[in-house]
Image (tube, rainbow, N blue to C red):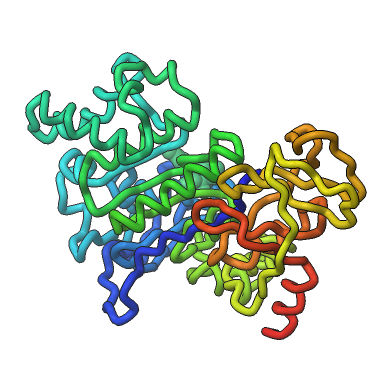
Amino acid sequence: MRPSSRIRGRSGGNPARVPEVAIEFANVTKRYPDGTVAVDDLSLTIEDGTITVFVGPSGCGKTTSLRMINRMVEPTSGQVLLDGRDVCESDPPVLRRGIGYVIQNAGLFPHRTVLDNVATVPLLSGWGRSRARERAAELLATVGLPAELGDRYPAQLSGGQRQRVGVARALAADSPVLLMDEPFSAVDPIVREDLQDELLRLQSRLGKTIVFVTHDVDEAVRLGDKVAVLRTGGRLAQYGTPAEVLRNPVDDFVASFVGRDRGYRGLSFMDATGVELQDVATIRLGEPVPRATTDWALAVNSDGRPRGWLPPKSTVDGGLREGDLVAGGSLYRRGTPLRGALDAALSSPAGLGVVVDDEERVIGVVTARQILDVIEQRR
Ligand SMILES: Nc1ncnc2c1ncn2[C@@H]1O[C@H](COP(=O)(O)OP(=O)(O)OP(=O)(O)O)[C@@H](O)[C@H]1O
């Protein structure tokens, strides 16, 4: 079973803080030489220390917008300001060295080891070799990679590990700004969720200004403090918090882009206050099972972590084994949004969503009915 946790590592922190503008697009247009208008009069401000996600259909100008921040693409008109200063006043290599940049498939140098890949920017910035490698080793640990992977080459890593190296390399710039262009698109959905969780955890510690490009609405609402929905032709359709965009799409384009199940996605922003946990019968693996089980019983290991469900009227000779169990659904971690609780209840073979604490020990169960009642009461 896998926790359907939605840890939102918000860095916004103190609500009294007046947000500083880290990046500003002021009437920015990009027309490529062949006449394609990739970005059309884009104006928005990105607050310091937040994650802003550019989302929209293919070709709507997300990558072009992102690349105008580090001058990989020059605007045709308008200005991109970084901390109030037009990026066009900065020398491009210097500017780029000071802005972390992560792309799909990580874009690692294939003939350099993982450690040397991560050490590249510190070396370019004039650090000595041993200090740069030390810093690189620290960064591998920061992104959750074991030190021994440092001596491998990128081809000897899994896709998820490569993406982590890409993030470590971008963090090596030690800049307050991180640009991420579809960084997790090439990995499978489970690894992708892990990488998203990791990014949120890192962000809650580092508080960077992150601009993140994706075409995946789920990823956008999961990661973004703010979401900018772009439409084809490079026009900004809506800019707001994920909850605003899901609840009040400004027009049909945004409504259809964020999808029909936006009501369900909206549960990602509702807390689970008012949902009372119910007790559940638990049986430890290895222990004898009472003869007459009438209801579903939840099997737990010696640490109290859930292992699966024992169906009603089961007879088990000897101690309870994993093979006697029906696999469970997703787990709901206490304190996380309501969406996870509903998913846990709906995916449970017993109809009972398993609620766990931060150590993933069972603390109770909830039913879908209870959650729907809470949603109804709040309407
Ligand atoms: N160098 C270029 N020359 C001409 N047109 C370009 C160039 N780069 C991008 N475009 C066009 O500009 C538009 C926006 O492209 P961009 O890559 O910014 O979109 P995107 O939203 O990131 O797309 P995707 O999600 O497919 O990566 C597209 O129509 C694209 O074909």
Q: Please tell me which residue lies in front, 56 or 233.
A: 56
Screen quadrant of the N terminus:
top right
Direction top: furthest residue: 111
Residue plotted at (31% across, 33% down): 140
Q: Please tell me which residue lies in front, 204 or 234.
A: 204
Screen quadrant of the C terminus:
bottom right
Residue plotted at (56% across, 63% down): 334
Q: Position of residue 107 (x, y in %)?
A: 39, 29
Q: Position of residue 185 (x, y in %)?
A: 54, 39
Q: How many discs appear?
A: 0
Q: Is residue 256 visible?
A: no
Using the rendered view, name the quadrant where residue 116 is placed.
top left
Q: Is residue 308 left or right of residue 44?
A: right
Is residue 273 depicted above or below 328 in this figure? below
Q: Please tell me which residue lies in front, 183 or 370.
A: 370
Using the rendered view, name the quadrant where residue 22 is placed.
bottom left
Residue plotted at (42% across, 64% down): 41
Q: Please tell me which residue lies in front, 27 or 170.
A: 170
Residue plotted at (72% across, 46% down): 299
Is residue 328 depicted above or below 339 in this figure? above
Is residue 67 depicted above or below 191 in this figure? below
Q: Is residue 296 left or right of residue 41?
A: right
Q: Position of residue 375 (x, y in %)?
A: 71, 78
Q: Is residue 330 visible?
A: yes
Q: Is residue 132 left or right of residue 214?
A: left
Q: Position of residue 134 (x, y in %)?
A: 17, 30
